Image (cartoon, grey):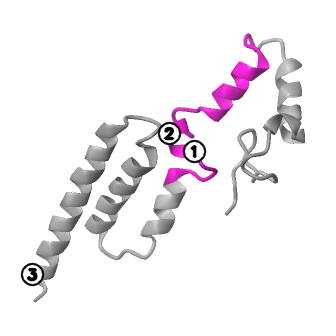
Amino acid sequence: MEIKCNYTEKPCPYPMDFDCSGCDIYKNAAMKFDNQPDYPYPFSEQVEKLKNDPVNHPAHYTAGGIECIDAIAAALTAQNDPMAAWLTGQCLKYLWRWPLKNGLEDLKKTRFYLDRLIKYMEEKNANSI
């Protein structure tokens, strides 16, 4: 599995437990920020902004070295039924983020979408007989 680097769009060449501060990519990012006086924040804060982009790469969807959207896309590629695929994707999304975002509320949302998926598939199977 390819792990994305937190500081570039390139894949990370190191294992997931590697300390990024020893990586050349990290050091180059530090030099980039340290050499530009228009950055009013210390490098560590700039790094956090890169890592925790709430729009493009939210922390609750990027944990574990693969982004949730990529995992969902891979899981749903083989599904032919758009509604079943959407409900499955919703389940996966809430299961992915629950420990990092809304906790029990996200688990309940997972159950809501899973119940909808089960009901949908039961009705679909009943209608196909």
Foreground residue, 88 or 16? 16
The mark found on residue 60 in the picture is 2
Where 33 falls versus 94 (above or below)? above
User: Does the magenta segment cover residue 3?
Assistant: no
The mark found on residue 63 in the picture is 1
Residue bearing the label numbered 3: 127
Where 119 falls versus 128 (above or below)? above
Left or right of residue 52, residue 11 in this image: right
Tell me if mark 3 has few (under 14), some (14-19) or many (20+) residues whose alpha carbon lies within 10 angstroms of its own.
Answer: few
Residue 58 pos. (x, y %): 53, 37
Residue contact between numbered discs 1 and 2, judged by CB atoms under 8 Å: yes
Where 7 falls versus 126 (above or below)? above
Q: Which residues are magenta?
A: 39-68
Residue 3 pos. (x, y %): 69, 54
Tell me if mark 1 has few (under 14), some (14-19) or many (20+) residues whose alpha carbon lies within 10 angstroms of its own.
Answer: some
SS at mark 2 in the image: helix
Q: CA distance from mark 2 to mark 3?
A: 39 Å
Left or right of residue 13, residue 94 in this image: left
SS at mark 1 in the image: loop
Q: Amino acid at mark 2?
A: His
Q: Where is the N terminus found, in terms of image quarters?
A: bottom right
| Residue name at image x 50 percent, y 39 percent | 60
Q: Amino acid at mark 3?
A: Asn
